[in-house]
Amino acid sequence: MPSRKILVPLFAAALCASAVLVAPAASAGEQAFKAVAAVRKLIASGEVPAGSRLTLGFKQGNMNAFLGNDLALQKEWESLTGIVLDVLIVPQQPIRETLRSTPDIDIAVARNHEYPDLLADGLITEVGPFMAEYGYRFDDNANDGYIRPELQSRVGERTVAIPADGDVVVLYLRRDLMDDAQEQAAFRKAYGRPLAVPKTWAEYEELVRFFHRPAQGLYGVAEERDEEGAWMNWMPRFLSSAAPHAELFDEQMRPRLTTPGAVAATESYVALVKYSPPGITDPGRNYNFTLPLFAQGKAFATMNTIAGARMFNSEGSTVRGKFVAVSLPGTRVDNRIVRQNTLIYGNNLVIPKSARNARLAFLYAMWLTDPDVSTRSIGVAGGFADPYRWNHLRDARVRKIYTPETLETFSAEWAVTQPAGTGLRGDALYLAALDRNLTAAARGEIGAQEAMSRTATEWEQITEKLGRAEQIRQWAEFRRQFGKRQ
Amino acid sequence: MSLPHAPSPAAAAPVRRSPFRQSLLVRLSIMFALGGLLVAAILVIGNRVLEDAKQRLENTVIRQVQPLAATHRLQTRSHELRTLELELPTVRDVFALPQYAERMQVEIEAMTAELAPFLAVLASTRPDDARRLERHWANYRGDLQEVIHLAGKMDLAAAEAITSTRTRTAHAAISSILRELVSTTEQAATEAYRQAREEQQRQQRFFLMLSLGGFLFLAAGLVVFARSLSRRLRTVRDAASRLAAGEHRTPIAISGDDEISDLGQAFNAMQEIVVSRERSLRAAQEELEDRVAQRTQALATANARLWMLSQAVEQNPIGVLIASADRRVEYANAAYVRVTGRPADTQLASALPEAADPERSREVDAEFRAALLAARDWDGERRSRRPDGSEYWEHLRLVTMRTEQGRPEHLLLMREDITERRTQEEKVAYQAYYDSLTALPNRTLALDRLQQATGRAAREGTMCAVMFIDLDNFKQINDTLGHVAGDELLCQASVRLRSVIRAEDTVARLGGDEFLIILGIAQASDADAVAAKIIQAFTPPFEIEGREFAASPSIGVSLFPDDGNDPSVLLRNADLAMYEAKDAGRNTFRFFNQKIHDDSVARMEMERELRGALERGELQVHFQPLVAARDCRLVGAEALLRWNHPVLGRVPPDRFIPIAEQSGLIVTIGNWVLDEACAHAARWREACDGEFVIAVNVSPRQFAAPGLVDTIRACVDRHAIPRNQLEIEVTEGLLIRNPAEVREAMLALEKIGVTVALDDFGTGYSSLSSLRAFPFHTIKIDRSFIRDLSEDAEDCALVVAAIRMARALGLRVVAEGVETEVQSRFLAHQESDVLQGYLFGPPIPPEDFVADWVHNPIRRASKS
């Protein structure tokens, strides 16, 4: 009889899938209506002058998602409220740097793992009081609610962000090659098992090795190995290295990176470098390098958010109709496979502490993330933002952009998804140390064991510097919230 | 009175008018209509001419500008496309590529749509240029589509290769053609515009000439008409002038048939009426003279009435002076001289005569002067001095009598001697604000002065001190020597208090033996010095009825603004500090501080809780065994009150008993303890062979309350307590306060078989005289001496001396706080009678006492 630990994620996945397929159409728009009414009330009371400007600090790729095709959403908002949206294109850098150097921004996008540092540095404001005031809550109903909003909105007990993206990781494989009879026969001959979607990281590595044919212009894999964000591709491997999931620290904040599981995760991370295109570990070789390779049919596999499907399914893509998005592999622990996913990038909305129009910014976010409005923002070509509400997954435009199969894989992955990063104050420092050592290992400068040992040592120093007692408290709080979920 | 002369029938008869006459209105209307038509015609023609010229100019401009605008739009779109294609390969985020591709596609379609009609028009005028432009656009569009396709494949390098070579050439060719077209179109536009402007200027000149001719014609017509009107109006004007001068009143000749001829006829009629009115006026003058005679008679009657009123004023006891508006005195009655003591001056001075108190009268004098100068009504009171030196209070009232038009005509000054009324009022005021015994300000005035003092200190940024003084021995002196002596003491005390403060400070008596001093000070230490001086001033004894008495003050001091801003708060805090001084042993002073306030609040809180404690069953009586020193056999118990509060827990007796005493609750609680103790003792007595002494503490407050002896007697009877088995424990403090009454009560208790023990012996005065003067049966040596028996030779000596002294007086000795065998043996050896202490057992609830002691009265200390 299967254990409860297996049944719970399965049940969650089934629930998500049934919500996608069975739930009736959402009665969307009420949230947007309330937001617009609140803005009009502010203007009528004189609290906000008509024609006020709201400065949005968005990245280049956010434009279509947050302002709509041909600025349709921007025009709609301005027409409904009379509040002018002034868009400031912010550089591709941690939002912390942007908020420090640009105090005029009223609303910005932040990645999930950045919240604790932003809050600790006093750069963002809590949105919980606004939510209470305007009767807005992160409803997670299966009809039009948010998908696991707690992962994307909170630091401890405080609500600091409004989810506007859903960046869980999925694995993209070349379906046309997998389905090829000759390839299947060759694989069975080489590995003694059928050519199939990998269940474990080890199987994944074998698959990648099998399809690595640089002479024919096909690389085994195009996973990112850039130093910035190295943790994103390492974390799923690490999390699935122990049951129910591995943890970065013990109760006393001692790093648990030198465990056999952590080292194995790092070895798996490093092992794929030899099946990757040359220069994969060079600085700046991020998804701008890997995704085009897969889209041009030059790689057998890659890992990225669901946004990859948006690109691979576009008209110019060589792999359109030839790829498949599957769940991430896992690790065999105690004779069962443990699979874990994590949130990575994330383009969620935060309100800077220095915002001159914080209340307006909140109401704009409330409007933008309304089930109806947000579906229109997700259902446009281009852009970063991916589905984050259940009703997004049922929308015809969205299904056309991402493909129905990819959306099904995506919805199931949420059941095994963990929060992004460490969840701690000092996250940027912890992750920078991890990224640096992972990259050194990927470049062959040090071994996996050494990378983990060095990271553990640096993490200890960071913890001491930040104050162990407070870090222990935060870690305990984080674990209370998410530690027993699986 | 004659009627106005009626107009002649000829003048009044309506003029018959021709139905077709040319009135002025008709002629003017016709003239203005013709003029208007002329102007309208000129404007219509002019407008048409100008509109034609403007339309021609606009058409010329539009014909030239439209191609220019279209060319410009094409240039803009072409540049936009070029910008997009150049930016596309530099996009840093692959997710932004579709946005650029989409925008490029939209721009290509817009350019194509824009170019089609443009080429159609161009082909008719410049077919070669049209063909060239179409060919280059087709090339450029193909290249751009390829760039979009490559962007879709995310092959940015290939896209960049195209944008840097092929599209560059195509875009340059298109731009060059469009620039040529713009240049050619601009030259043609300039020539066409010049011709249109010349035509427009010709039309303008024609219009100006036409307008000038029309206006000249209109002006000539107006001049002719105006001259005709002017001549006829002058005729009427000259006739009117003659009528006004009374000359030649013949009717004027009338010509024409319009409004001016009507005016001439009306003038003739009016002239006839004027002559008639002159006759009527002469008759009216005669009638007016008759009326003057009648009024003169009425005036004589009024004069008689006026004389009567002047007599009333003359005899009025209020001084009345009447002066003209320029203050020349016209009249003063006899009372005026009587009140002021001087004859009236010829001129009413703006200043009043000499005041008895110039300082206090200054304001009143100023008001009077201002009212007099402004000629307005006023009244006020003032203390004045007559020339003979006598002073008097007078009420002054100044009234300005005015004409019907409101102009001041006379001034009326009334002066009334109100000395008697004011004397009565001052007496009443003094009684309201001063203490009749000491002549010091009373509480009301003191609070008013305090309010003033704090206000002044706040304004000047200084401080003030409030001293609450209570005489320590007043009650004793008052009760001993009577109220007369007490009053004498208060008077002497007030003199001493006054002697130590400055004239500007305040000493007040609040009531009883409580005084209040209000000082203006610069710093807190000033109050310190004054308090010390007060203590010093009370050092010499008071001599009352030939005897000397000591009376010391206890002083509480609060400071403004440190201890409060409100007078009532300052007074309360000084009062609290005074109690602190009392607690510190009297004859001293204490400054208010936060601890005093906190203690007070805590005390009040505890008192509030204590009030219902008995009803809620929170109070308990515990019993501590009393054992015989010689054999440690149980001989009785001391009843001790315990309070177990649901929130505060077990409240120590030394915290709540003083509060119970201060609040008076001790009387009720003490009676309950007495009853409880006696009830239990009655039940235990039998088990102890009929010998069981129950000791109960009684506080001074209980002694002060009436009926203590009766209460104890009732309790003894109710529980059948045998003689000498109920012992009341009192402290030495009780003896000092009301010695006579206490002694009397103790004797009464002795009579009913209740013994009295002196508790805590050794800690107070421990005077032998007290032991002798009061009928004690027992002394209880305080635990502090017993505790140090084994170490402190001095304590040993004191205990031995106490036991000896008690023995000598026939008193029983109880040693409290026995905790060790050594102490027990020592006390037994020294022939102490009874021992009490933790060596034998702590105070315990009655049920435990029954189990531990009543059922086992022979216990050794070692068993406890």
Image (cartoon, coloured by chain):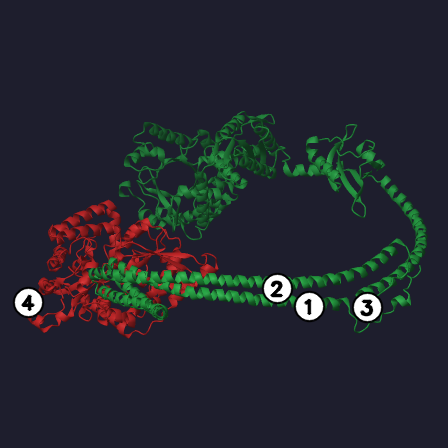
Pinpoint the chain carrying mark 2.
B
Q: Residue at x 17, y 70 (%)?
A: A322
Q: Specify the colour of chain A.
A: red
Query: Looking at the picture, do discs 4 and 2 lie on one chain?
Result: no
Q: Earlier in the sequence, mark 2 or mark 3?
A: 2
Amino acid type assigned to the residue bearing label 4 in the image: Tyr
Residue annotated with mark 3: B257
Q: Where is residue B125? Give x, y as percent.
A: 37, 68
Quadrant of the drawing holding the C terminus of chain A: bottom left
Distance, label 1 to label 4, CA atoms, is 116 Å
Q: Earlier in the sequence, mark 2 or mark 1?
A: 1
Give the Cα distance between marks 4 and 2.
110 Å
In the rendered structure, the colour chosen for chain B is green
**Gap between marks 2 and 3, in whole Å?**
37 Å
Q: Which secondary structure, mark 3?
A: loop
Give residue A17's quadrant in the image: bottom left
* Amino acid of disc 1: Leu
Above/below status of A473 relative to B760: below
Q: Are marks 4 and 3 on the same chain?
A: no
Please rate how many residues cluster around mark 4, counting C-alpha atoms within 10 Å: few if below 14, some from 14 to 19, many from 20: few
Residue bearing mark 1: B34
Subunit under mark 1:
B
As measured in the structure, the alpha-carbon distance from the residue carrying label 4 to the one carrying label 3 is 135 Å
Using the numbered discs, state the Cα–Cα distance from disc 2 to disc 1 in whole angstroms.
16 Å
Q: Amino acid at mark 2?
A: Leu
- For disc 3, the neighbor class at 10 Å (few under 14, some 14 to 19, many from 20) is some
Which amino acid type is shown beneath numbered disc 3?
A: Asp
Give whichever of B399, B554 is nearer the camera: B399
* Residue farthest along the left direction in this orientation: A189
**Label 4 belongs to which residue?**
A191
